[in-house]
């Protein structure tokens, strides 16, 4: 079984004219970055390469992301369903959404950048809202680097999630660091 860490960027967003909230059908993918544990390699695909990308997600695959159940899975799954390949429904795959795990334990959301800073000592270079601008400006190589960087960060956090069974999460209101535990003590959050 392979584990795939992934992130998507889109050409548009829910707030764009003619889209509307939760209208995943109206969102168009610009790029998808992935890391395959089985191949120990990063890949990045453009919208026209969804058939090639789908090969990584076929079969027995665990899918890992950040806020992926809310955004990445619904958008990418629509593309995959159009391909009509057997066994290619992301909702039927084993999934780990790190943000969902944190929300279940703490009842609040956190940005990928703040989570990375607390656990890895790094911040994101850009904000996700800049990705659409990069696409519109035709800066596809820059966009791919940005998306791959998000996957690198998500992978590093997932590796910590697996090895130490907890992540450090800054409380949104107080800024205090909370240790969120997973595994046998799943869903527990304790102030450090």
Image (spheres, grey):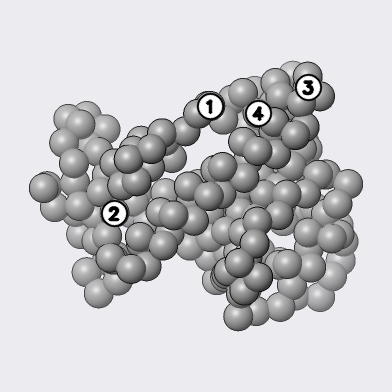
> Please, is residue 126 above or below residue 156 in the view?
above
* Quarter of image, res 61: bottom right
Crowd around label 3: few <14 · some 14–19 · many ≥20 (10 Å):
few
Report whether 27 appears left or right of 122: right
Crowd around label 2: few <14 · some 14–19 · many ≥20 (10 Å):
many
- Give the mark toward the camera: 1 or 3: 1
SS type, badge 1 = loop
> Please, is residue 30 above or below residue 42 in the view?
above
SS type, badge 2 = strand
* Quarter of image, res 189: bottom left
SS type, badge 4 = helix
Q: CA distance from mark 4 to mark 2?
A: 27 Å
Kindly identify the residue that appears in the image at 71 percent across and 24 percent down: 134
Crowd around label 1: few <14 · some 14–19 · many ≥20 (10 Å):
few
Question: Dot 4 corresponds to which residue?
Answer: 131
Kindly identify the residue that appears in the image at 43 percent across and 40 percent down: 112
Say whether disc 1 or disc 2 marks the residue closer to the N-terminus: 1
Q: CA distance from mark 1 to mark 2?
A: 22 Å
Question: Dot 2 corresponds to which residue?
Answer: 167
Task: Please report contact status of discs 4 and 1: CB closer than 8 Å, yes or no.
Answer: yes
């Amino acid at each position: 079984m392979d584990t795939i860490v992934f992130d998507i960027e889109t050409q548009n967003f829910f707030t764009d004219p003619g889209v509307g909230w939760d209208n995943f059908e109206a969102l168009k993918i610009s790029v998808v970055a992935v890391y395959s544990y089985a191949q120990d390699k990063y890949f990045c695909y453009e919208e026209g390469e969804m058939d090639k990308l789908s090969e990584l997600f076929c079969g027995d695959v665990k899918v890992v992301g950040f806020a992926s159940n809310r955004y990445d899975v619904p958008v990418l799954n629509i593309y995959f369903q159009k391909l009509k390949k057997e066994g290619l429904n992301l909702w039927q795959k084993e999934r780990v959404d790190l943000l969902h795990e944190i929300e279940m334990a703490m009842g609040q959301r956190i940005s990928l950048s703040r989570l990375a800073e607390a656990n890895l000592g790094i911040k994101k270079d850009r904000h996700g809202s800049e990705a659409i601008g990069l696409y519109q400006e035709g800066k596809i190589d820059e966009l791919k680097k940005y998306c791959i960087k998000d996957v690198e960060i998500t992978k590093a956090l997932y590796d910590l999630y697996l090895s130490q069974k907890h992540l450090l999460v800054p409380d949104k209101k107080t800024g205090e660091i909370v240790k969120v535990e997973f595994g046998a003590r799943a869903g527990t959050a304790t102030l450090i």
